[in-house]
Amino acid sequence: MNNVVEARGLHKYYRSGDQTLNILVGLDLDVAPGEAVAVVGESGAGKTTLLNLLGGLDKPTDGRILVDGTDIFGLKDARRARFRNRRVGYVFQFHHLLPEFTALENVMMPLLIARVDAAEAEQRAQKYLEAVGIRERETHRPAKLSGGERQRVAVARALTAEPAVVLADEPSGNLDERTAESLHDLLFDLNARLGQTFVIVTHNRALARRCARTLLLEGGVLHDTETP
């Protein structure tokens, strides 16, 4: 079975004058279909940089990334943006919902950008609002939702295009402990019920322990670890 995500020999560095800051140095990663993988490490280790590369938001200095069998940096910018919109979902620490739109409209947005028919977009958005347990709040704008509800809407938005992989960057980092646990339950329910593949950057030990694998990003490469 082909991996959903494959990274080979990833390098990422920044130059400032005579100084070179190495972030990733020959990193490799494989993520199987339906797998939930946690990436942990110290602040500044490059975890968010790695997610940005995997999702095609940033370009590696060197190396190759395949998502759903597609070499994403073999695509021109416009095609890569279209691919990202259709095959990669994102959940961030802060929900980044558009405040002037309802929960339903926010979840529909990636589909409308992809030029999906509005009626179909609405139907699919309602399906995923139902999947995250917040369908009854679909007409509410973000200001009328709790922090946990906003993050559930963000998860539904990430899922609505039915992506190959969801990249989550500290998805519960802005929530209190009880609300965070509820969000974790949701993510792993979606992982089990829908077979959704996740790569999750987190400092939350409880969240990392629930993933199938935990990888430590240290020294610019990933190490297998059972203890986050």
Image (spheres, rainbow, N blue to C red):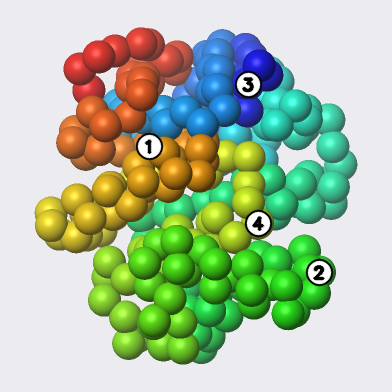
Q: Secondary structure at mark 1?
A: strand
Question: Quick one: 16 or 114, which is closer to the camera?
Answer: 114
Q: Nearer the viewer, mark 1 or mark 2?
A: 2
Q: Which residue is painted at 55% across and 22% down in the image?
A: 32
Rendered image: mark on residue 103? none
Q: Which mark is residue 161?
A: 4
Q: Secondary structure at mark 2?
A: loop
Q: Amino acid at mark 3?
A: Asn
Q: CA distance from mark 1 to mark 4?
A: 21 Å
Residue 61, image quadrant: top right
Give whichever of discs 1 and 3 has the lower sequence position. Answer: 3
Mark 1 / mark 2, whichever is N-terminal: 2
Q: Amino acid at mark 4?
A: Ala
Which of the two discs, 3 and 2, labels the residue nearer the N terminus? Answer: 3
**Separation (CA) of disc 3 from disc 2:** 28 Å
Q: State the residue at coordinates (26%, 76%).
A: 146
* Most distant residue in the left direction: 177
Mark 3 and mark 2 in contact? Answer it, CB < 8 Å: no
Image position of 173 with respect to 28: above or below: below
Identify the residue position indicated by label 3 in the image.
3
Return the x and y of residue 25 as percentages of the image width and height: 52, 14
Looking at the picture, does residue 62 appear above or below residue 145?
above
- Location of the N terminus (image quadrant): top right
Q: Earlier in the sequence, mark 2 or mark 4?
A: 2
Instruction: Identify residue type, mark 1.
Output: Val
Say if mark 1 contacts mark 2, CB within 8 Å.
no
Q: Amino acid at mark 2?
A: Arg
Image quarter of the C terminus:
top left
Residue 57 can be seen in this image: no
Question: What residue is pinned by disc 2?
Answer: 115
